[in-house]
Image (cartoon, helix red, strand yellow):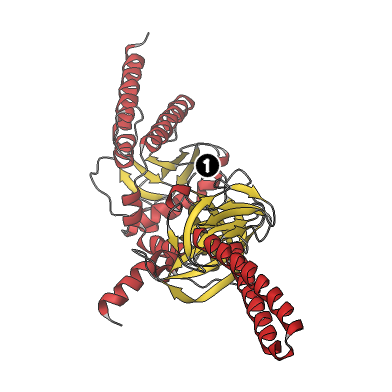
Amino acid sequence: MDARLLEKLNHFLALENRLRNASNLQQIAQIASSDSQQLLAFDSCLFFSGPHLKLIAASNVSTVDATSSEAQGWREQVRRHFADATAQPPLQLEIPPPEHHRNEVASQTLTLMPLGNKNPEGCLAILRQRRFSEQELQVLRELAAAVHQAILAQRGARRFSLRRWCRRRPLLVAAALAAIGLIPVRQSVLAPATLAAIEPRIVSARTDGVVREIVIPPNAPVQSGQLLFTLEDAEVTAEIDRVQQEIVLYQERLRMTRQYNFQQASAGHKLAQAETDLSIRKLDLEYQNTLLEKTRVKAPASGVAIYTDPAEWIGRRIRAGEKVMEIVKPDARQIQIDLPTVDAIGLPQQARTVFYAESNPLAPIEGQLHYHSLLTSEGENLPASYRLLATIDEDQPQIPINTRGHARLYGARVPLIYYLLRRPLATARRWIGV
């Protein structure tokens, strides 16, 4: 092999190695415009980068001024013929000397070599006195391919940095954040809720007394008129026995008074008094029987009886009207929500809600709001809350009644920035006092 050709081959391999090890585009441009002079004899080489053909490097020059008149002139020359060079690379042009130096300076050849075929990454502009031979053009093509490959490799190795992107494009970032903040989202709030019964029947004591026996166990199905629990009736039973004995006595007195009335007509007033006394005792017996009936509490309707442990009630003194248990229908349920006043949002009519039971959060129950109390209620260790009720669209029978959980209420659509800053703004307003 010819020693000269071997030397050029070594120069080309060394040039490729330096291109592969380049850390940025500026270094690639400097290597392509300066170090390639050992392969191709030229006067100067200009490196134009990107689709806009920005001059970033020149041969044997550390830095270039892209705003100078000479750089602008060469850039305009390259841009004018770049399309033709892309169609038939490389393109060699004869550049005549200026008119005032036409007799002193010979014309030059400008060779344009795009870096890439379909979408060039830039262009190499080489100036020299004579045109390139076919062998030199082939070397130039290989050089352009190596430079193009180095640019693609360096671009692929560059990692995306959000911080650098935001620093370079502050207006775009601000516009993007403003657009995101105006995205309409559905406002929602989470509140404690219970799966409650619809119109439960309250079972209470009809008279003062002590609970003697609860006939049915908790959560047992009952029928209308079925005995539920009884109160102590010893005093009422003793009083009934006394009144019954008095009735027997007054019945005998009435019989004797009637016989005496046949013997003596002036005893008519005693007969009327005896009949009155007997009627009073019978009324007293009816009253005592009514009291005895009140000690036996029966179910007002059919359903399921719900109450606490029977041991908490047996032997306990209760007052008339005090609640003992409830009778509910298991299939007639609704979502009862206690919405804290600090979380209150604007809710439309029939607002959508989703109930998540603590015992089974993977089986949500959807519903629609139908009642919104305007009065607040406060419980022990609980904040002031509004009472809300929602009908159930599709029930989950496996979740028992009176199960506690949380319900998410969905309000109107608001901008995302308002959704995120509603609570902080409310807190700041309370602290500032506005």
Residue furthest to the bottom in view is 266
Tell me the residue at 33%/28% (across/down).
Answer: 20
Q: Say left or right for 49 vs 326.
A: left
Q: Position of residue 377 (x, y in %)?
A: 43, 72
Residue 279: name its quadrant.
bottom right
Q: Is residue 409 something one can see in this rendering?
A: no
In the rendered image, the vertical position of residue 413 relative to residue 133, given as above or below: below
Q: Position of residue 236 (x, y in %)?
A: 53, 63
* Displayed quadrant of residue 340: bottom left
- The three-letter amino acid code for the residue at tag 1 is Asn
Residue 181 spot, x, y in % from top left: 45, 65
Taking the view exactly as shown, the residue that stands out farthest to the left is: 62
Q: Secondary structure at mark 1?
A: loop
Task: State the residue lying farthest toward the top.
Answer: 1
Where is 260 relative to 1, above or below?
below
145 and 212: which one is in front? Answer: 212
In this figure, which residue is indicated by the disc labeled 1?
A: 119
Q: Is residue 128 above or below residue 288?
A: above
As rendered, which of 31 and 349 lies closer to the eye?
349
Determine the residue positioned at 71% across, 74% down. Answer: 255
- Check the image and name the residue furthest to the right: 262
Q: Is residue 316 left or right of residue 295?
A: left
Q: How many numbered circles does the render carry?
A: 1
